[in-house]
Image (cartoon, grey):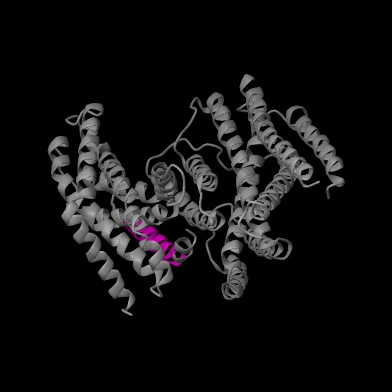
Amino acid sequence: MSAPSGITLATLTKDIRLEWRSKDAINSMLFFALLVVVVFSFSFDPVAEESRHIAGGLVWVAFLFAAVVALNQTWAREIRNQVLDAYRVSPAPANALFLAKAVGNFVFVVVLEALMTPLFIMFYKLRALGPAWQLLPVAILGTWAIVVNGTFFAAMSLRTRSREIMLPLLLFPVSLPALISMVEATNIILVGDPSTSAKFWIVLLATYDVVFTTGCLALFETVLHAE
Amino acid sequence: MKKAFPILGLLTAVFLSYALYEALVVAPREQTMGDVQRIFYYHVPSAWTAFLLFAINFLASVQYLVRRNPKTDQIANWVVVAVGVLTCIGAYVIRPLPQDVYPSSIVTTALSVVGIYFLIKNYFSEQGTDILALTTAEVGVVFCTVVLVTGPLWARPVWGIWWTWDVRLTSTLVLWLIYVSYLVLRRFSTSGQTPVLAAALAVFGALDVPLVYFSIWIFRTQHPQPVIGGGGSIDPRMLHILLINWLAFLCFAFLVCWSRYQVERLQRDLEETQALEALLEPGGNIR
Amino acid sequence: MTFLYAAYTATWAIHITYLITVVRRYTRLKREVSELNKRKT
């Protein structure tokens, strides 16, 4: 029996390989994010100076909705082929599976963000007036916050009616501190006011990530066996 | 208890009427806000009751999760006691404390949390703990709805705005959202292990609440907003009437919870009996 | 002040609505229990 890290790696590479071949999740995410950007462009005039202040919020809302699209089908493949049942019976630790799924989702969403960011910059003529390098930890920590909770709640809503609406319903309230931190940090960095600093928000994001990753890892075994 | 229920109901109704009279007639008229301020006598006790109910829900959910395994149960007992002791020590050691927070209140809170945890443990079976969690969540959401409705009704005439995204309002709204999603999960889940899932969600929500409060507090102190329900000292006569109303609402909440608990117990017993009946049918698999 | 009365009315409206749902659930359950008893005998 391979070590937990081996299981995680194996599941992760399997997921990435499957995704690379079918490009299901990436395509739907990309298209959805693009639609959201276009709709927002009509609602909020991108050229106006005020849009720089709300651009942070818009970007993260678009990514959040797109991430939900990906998260919804996280476990669909596993259910279809009774992989979860096999996993439950095996002596492998549940955390390894969870970690693999979460990291896989993380990779997909990060790829999405990398593809969408140039588009956002173009549509909204964004220019970071503050320290742009800080956007990187914000993006990484923020994406992980959404993904780790999303994967957990996706597992939780597996056997519920209206599964697709259940996930955002559970995810959004719990993600609020992370969302606030991400939006505030992005706005501070874009607006570039020298008296403000995004450092506090980045620390809060990191705290959120630690608390909820621990929570998810601790409770996933329970959730897996509860299905 | 069943026999006492009508009498208790009547007493509570009388108490609530008395509290209402106190709030509307006896309480002194507030200088700046006028009579509208009397909403406070309903708004604040509802908020405190909702928080108490959600706290009980959290403790019951934790109980439910740890009780399934005797080892985790033991560990959890020690953790709860340790947290209680550390909080009591910390209340006197940590300086400076936030404004308006006194060591005695921290100690009281810690001791009551530990007390409630062990009371639930002794008086509720495993299934009972789950029903308790469901009941307190439902009644808590009802009280929280009252808070979110009376709040804007108070804010509008006094501050001219229905809503603002300040700390208290936003964190109360988020709390409401988290528990509504908890109830939705309970209703829509078709898994046989719904109680376990719901308990896990309740724990998550409880982890989230302090973070929400903290992040919104920092968020809003950077962008000054009108502070609703600001602190400051309170007229002792008003405090007296506030506490009367709170006590009346606590009695009311207790009776509502008790009723809901019994109804849920009845429902589960019925479902169990029906399931058993279906198994023992002449055309069934068994026998 | 209309807001004051609205607030108090709303509070009790919410509580009474919830109590009605509990009572309705209870009467439905009682009916099912009596049906079950009838079927047994």
Q: Which residues are magenta?
A: A202-220
Please provide percent x and percent y for residue B282. 67, 52
Please provide percent x and percent y for residue C36. 74, 44
Quadrant containing the N terminus of chain A is bottom left
Displayed quadrant of residue B120: bottom right
Please provide percent x and percent y for residue B140. 62, 44
Q: Nearer the viewer, residue B81 or A130?
A: B81
> Is A146 a magenta residue?
no
Q: Nearer the viewer, residue B107 or B69?
A: B69
Q: Main secondary structure of the magenta part?
A: helix
- Position of residue B33 relative to residue A210, above or below, is above
Which residue of the protein is positioned furthest toward the top in this rendering? C2
User: Going 24% across and 32% down the picture, which residue do you hit?
Assistant: A40
Instruction: Report whether B240 appears left or right of A60.
Output: right
**Residue B282 in sight in this render:** yes
> Is A204 a magenta residue?
yes
Q: How many marks?
A: 0
Instruction: Report whether B141 appears left or right of A12.
Output: right
Displayed quadrant of residue A140: bottom left
